[in-house]
Amino acid sequence: MNKKVLLLFALFFGMVSFAQQERKLELNKDTNLIDVTYYHDNGVVSQTGSYTTDGKLQGEWLSYDTEGKKSISANYDNGKKVGKWFYWTDKTLKEVDYTNNAIVSINEWKRDAKTSLAIRN
């Protein structure tokens, strides 16, 4: 199988699985962004965020688990990962700092302890 066919298959599969999730889209006339809300199968909000009119992720995106608890807070600028991203689990909070779509540092808290990892390019 050549690389183009494999790439098209992967892209199609990703779009089909993503398209099956229920969503609500609305053009925000003040920001000229498309605000979107995705839902889990049980009707609970899965993600909220915005797209530019040319389809790039923009601003703050929030993800929630099936019970409605926040699991991820992310930031995009014209499709690129920027700023601090937060990942919550039952036992940890992880902070990942992005600059120009690259990880700059990672901090993780486990209840009362904190560990840090700095990544240098």
Image (spheres, helix red, strand yellow):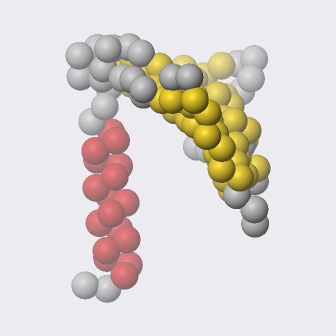
In screen coordinates, is 103 left or right of 63?
right
Image quadrant in which you'd find residue 38 = top left
| Residue visible at 34% across and 41% down in the picture | 18
Q: Is 16 in front, or is 97?
A: 97
Quarter of the picture holding the C terminus: bottom right
- Please determine whether, in this image, residue 85 is positioned above or below residue 3: above
Looking at the image, residue 95 sits to the left or right of residue 36; the answer is right
Q: Does residue 72 appear left or right of residue 84 in this picture?
A: left
Give the farthest residue toward the front: 113
Q: Position of residue 59 (x, y in %)?
A: 68, 31
Residue 97, given in percent of the width and then of the height, sits at: 70, 43
Which residue, as the protein is rendered here, is positioned at the far bottom? 2
Quarter occupied by the N terminus? bottom left
Residue 98 x/y as whole percent = 70, 47
Front residue of this view, candidates 5 and 71: 71
Q: Which of the two residues, 41 or 55, is positioned nearer the viewer here?
A: 41
Q: Nearer the viewer, residue 11 or 111?
A: 111
Residue at image position (70%, 18%) is: 29
| Residue 51 visible in this rendered orientation of the protein | no
Q: Residue placed at 58% from the left, 43% from the top?
A: 55
In the displayed structure, 23 sits above or below 7; it is above
Query: How many numbered circles are shown?
Result: 0
At 73% from the left edge and 38% from the top edge, which residue is drawn?
Answer: 83
